[in-house]
Image (cartoon, helix red, strand yellow):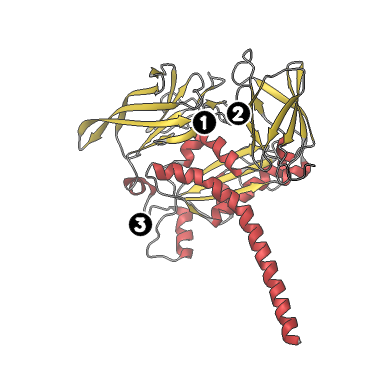
Amino acid sequence: MCFFLFDYQRFFIFLCFLNSLLYCNIALCSSEYAMKIIHEAREKNGLSQLDYSDQLSQIAKSHASYLAINHQCSHIQSAHLNFFSGVHARNRAKVLDYYPTILLENVYCGHTRDWFHAISDLMTGIYHRLTFLSYDINTVGYFLDQTAQSTALSDSALLFKFVFELSYKPKVFFCTEIDFKKTATHSLFNYGLIDPVEPLQALSQPDLVVYPWPNQTSVPVVFTDQEEPDPTPTLTISGMPISVQFNPNAVVTVLSFKLTNVQDKSQIVSLWALNASNDVQKKIKKNEYAWFPVKPLKRDTRYQVSLEYALQVHKKTKKMTKVWFFETEKNPFQNITLLQKNENHLIYDAHQPIYFQIDQPQLPYGAWINTIECSGCQHDCHLHLHAHDIFSFTTQPIPVTCSIQLKHNKQIMQVMVKPKKTGKNEM
């Protein structure tokens, strides 16, 4: 009898353990799945993969908690606010006894807890994209803080704070971990204990990194200029930027860049080029380049990119050409004409993202549309909208019917969002 009682207790404990393990895996799985975007972008370009770091995740957590509790969205912390752990990322790392050779940070603040959405948005921003695709990093940590939901100042508050910390983990020779920490507080390079980030890290990396990567599909067509700092102060909206990063050790000169619509064979001539010489934010390095189509790209379209550059090899200049293709996103949405007085209906499949587009020819790309009421939906129903863009949200964990009121200037449109009937419970 005692044997069975003891066995039952052990079995119950085992079930509890499995339940907690499953919960943790589900919570982590979404972030790991989303990180595949970054890993794939690096892999397709031949860059080294990023190893997960618990230490970097702790640094990310400390900053995400600060942002959430203080309703901030910044890389810099203020000492007089709650949860202060250091002004800059490097200061916060030092508090946690971490002394990196290089430390980069990406921050995303939004209305959704969706990791995939957060990283996808960051990859459209040129500065954040170049950070994820940096030659100089090989480790990553990340954290999402959702506690701002309980202290939100308004329904439009950016409740979800995603923080990514990216670093280079060096090889340490002839010293213990304690010795490494001591030397790192003074200098990481003066003792011959580690491989420096440059040039050795870059030597094993590809000659250049491009994004969109060759044969990438479902590429967004528009850059809505919501990145901070603003890489394009003279543009309010543009097409998806194409970026090129050359190996930091390369001596290179860009000769020409062409973007062509393969379907109609038309060349996109209106391009705004961004490089180290004209970057007003001083974020672009000497071997980094980006081209912004002045107008949004066409959806469901194949584009060709042709790049010519001169590469100096052994004191000789060699002319090089790189040609690749990518395809833009298709139209997974239902069109809604903005400012219709009648009620609009969106029918969606349960547990699937809801896609729609507000289509109004009179509105320019990027025109602000305010969500003034959202009833019956989950927390992530609050939408941050621009005209003509594709919008998506989910009503998980359960399908719901909800009402969204959209306003532009003084005109209001009502949208009813309803789950598709499965037929199982119909009479």
Label 1 vs 3, first from the N-terminus: 3
User: Closer to the observer: label 1 or label 3?
Assistant: 1
Q: Amino acid at mark 1?
A: Glu
Of circles 3 and 2, which is in front?
A: 2
Kind of residue indicated by mark 2:
Ile
Numbered mark located on residue 329 in the image: 1
Tell me the tag on residue 390: 2
Does residue 79 appear anywhere in the picture? no
Residue lying at 67% horizontally and 19% vertically, measured from the top left: 337
Tell me which corner region of the image, top left, top right, bottom left or bottom right, holds residue 19: bottom right
Do residues under tags 3 and 2 come within 8 Å of each other at their CB atoms?
no
Judge from the rendering whether residue 409 lies leftward or rightward of residue 89; answer left or right: right
Residue sitting at x 41%, y 55%: 170
Q: Is residue 266 visible?
A: yes
Secondary structure under the numbered disc 1 in the rendered image: loop
Residues at badges 2 and 1 in contact (C-beta under 8 Å)?
A: yes
Distance, label 3 to label 2, CA atoms, is 52 Å
Task: Look at the numbered disc 3 and give the secondary structure of its residue.
Answer: loop
Tell which circle, 2 or 1, labels the residue nearer the N-terminal end.
Answer: 1
Quadrant in which the C terminus is drawn: top right
Gap in angstroms between the C-alphas marked 2 and 1: 10 Å
Crowd rating for badge 1 (residues with CA inside 10 Å; few <14, some 14–19, many 20+): some
In the image, taking residue 275 as reference, residue 108 lies left or right, namely right
| Element assignment for label 2 | strand
Residue 56 at x, y = what percent? 54, 52
Q: Which badge, 3 or 2, is on the more N-terminal residue?
A: 3
Quadrant of image for the N terminus: bottom right
* Type of amino acid under label 3: Gly
Residue count near mark 2 (Cα–Cα under 10 Å), binned few <14, some 14–19, many ≥20: many
Q: Residue furthest top?
A: 362
On the image, the x and y values in percent for residue 77 come to: 63, 41
Residue marked by disc 3: 192
